[in-house]
Image (spheres, rainbow, N blue to C red):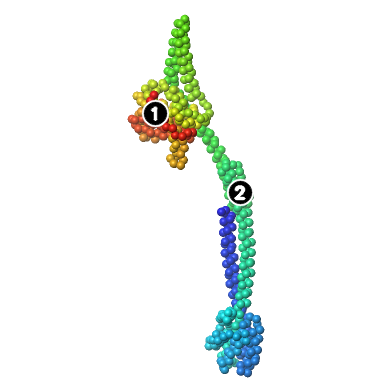
Amino acid sequence: MKIGTKLTLYLSVIIVLVLCGFGYLDILSRRDILIRKMKAEVRSAGRTLKVSLEEISPPEKREYIQGLIGAMGEYERNLGVVIYYARGNLVFHSPSLRGKIEPYLDLTRRSMEKNAPQEEFETYGKVPVFVYTFPLEDREGKTIGGASILQETSSMEKEIEQTKWSIFIMISVLILGTVTLVLLGTRKWINQPISNLMEGIQNFAGGNLDYQIDWKKADELSELARAFNQMAVDLRKAQERVIRETETKLELERGLRESEKLAIIGQLASGLAHEIGTPLNIIYGRTELIQKGLEDKEAQQKNLDIVLRQTERITKIIQQLLGFVRKKKPEQKVLSLPPLLECALELLDHQVRKQKVRVVKGRMDGLPSIIGDSDQLQQVFLNLILNAIHSMPEGGTLSISGSSKRISKDGRPGDQRSYLEVSVEDTGVGMEKEVLQNIFTPFFTTKDTGTGLGLMVTQGIVQDHEGWMEVESEVGRGSRFKVYLPSLGEEVIGEPVRQ
């Protein structure tokens, strides 16, 4: 429910309660006024009748008394009059009083005993009446009798009922008019500005930080609109600042990755020189043999085939190195894991043989593809394999495997998807707990010639590919690095085979 609607209902309920309370009190007030007016009329008539009756002697003035009673009965609201004289036990009453009058005689006698007027609301038959009773005195002040005037209250009740309806109609009109005004006011001064604010917020949420809320009235909502506009300006400035800082950070990260790549190239240089030097020596020797045996066509062909193969080998090594060194923008392509690992192993083949490391590769047929940058991912695997080789100075076993698993990045069961797990495991010296906790810290290294950036850059590349890394290590038993990358297929687990 909207705020304007809630406010309208809240104010309407208050208005209805207030006006109903006012109407109820007004009805009570008018009823009291009518009752007091009726009593005043009856009292006035009673005083007039009292004066007239106290000036006469009852036995001689019967006709006069009946005339007074008849005159009193002409008033439309008077139901009747009952007059009682103690001397002679005389009772006079209006002809209209055809029922029992004993209750009113009792009231008259009670008034005579107390020598004071009495007022009561009674019922004559089924007619509600107001009874006004007063004592009669002679000239010497002695009580000689009493009189009761019966006044119908039905006319007063009718007036009260009419008053109720008039007040009800008036209050209904007031409620309807007031609620209508409140509804129009809340729509104009609350709903409309809140709708403008919501539209502005939706534009802000959609990234349109140039949107400005136009609300020029001088109220709190106007101040809120100005605050939103200022917030949009501040957010736009902050967004521009974040973009600049992000670009700067990305440039720094690219620089670090290139620096680490150059460090890897430096470590590969000696091995590559040996790899290229060996076929060059073979080419040189075979060329000399060709010169010496120009007449032996079969030997020449054999030597030329060897020269061609060695030249292709040199070309392949140089192309691999140039492909890794060449600086280019990150690409997002569908890649297969086995060729990336094979290329990394070929580049590090000399270090593998020099360290007397045995390579065990898992069966990777049928693994799903991944999306990423081949150059960056090759740098990841070169770093991990090179670190594994360095951790086995006396030789050992390097195990590389890949598998597809359906797991959750954050460990939540409902957020699972397919990931490619690449495991690089060695049987080297392992790492202590303190070293293991800091291996991804920039510039932290245990090598004399290390940069301390390799694993940090490796982790950054993996995270850029929406993946993560896990490390297990034990001193004297080796380490295992696991790289998880989002894949495009279902679970296919590779079985390890020896090579």
Q: Quadrant of residue 211?
A: top right
Q: Which residue is mark 1?
A: 496
Q: Where's residue 303, x and y in %? A: 45, 11
- First-in-chain label (2 vs 1): 2
Mark in the foreground, 2 or 1? 1
Residue 411: assigned label:
none
In the depicted view, which residue is nearer to us: 255 or 80? 80
In the image, what residue type sits under mark 1? Answer: Pro
Q: Position of residue 132 (x, y in %)?
A: 58, 83
Query: Who's the residue at 63% across and 51% down the image?
Result: 217
Q: Residues within 10 Å of mark 2 (few under 14, many from 20)?
A: some
Classify 10 Å Cα crowding around label 1: few (below 14), some (14-19), many (20 and above).
some
When the figure is inspected, residue 69 is found, relative to residue 203, above or below; the finding is: below
Res 142 seen here? no
- 168 is higher (above) or lower (below) than 96: above
* The N terminus: image quadrant: bottom right
**The one of 338 and 223 positioned closer to us in this rendering:** 338
The residue indicated by pointer 2 is: 196
Element under disc 2: helix
Labels 2 and 1 touching (C-beta < 8 A): no
Indicate the position of residue 335 as horizontal and vertical percent values. Answer: 49, 29
Q: Is residue 265 above or below residue 300?
A: below
Give the alpha-carbon distance from disc 2 to disc 1, as whole Å: 64 Å
- At mark 1, the secondary structure is strand
Amino acid marked by disc 2? Asn
Counting the numbered discs, the total is 2
Res 488 visible: yes
- The vertical placement of 28 against 146, above or below, is above
Q: Which residue does the image show at 37% across and 24% down from the upper left?
A: 358
- Quarter where residue 80 is shown: bottom right
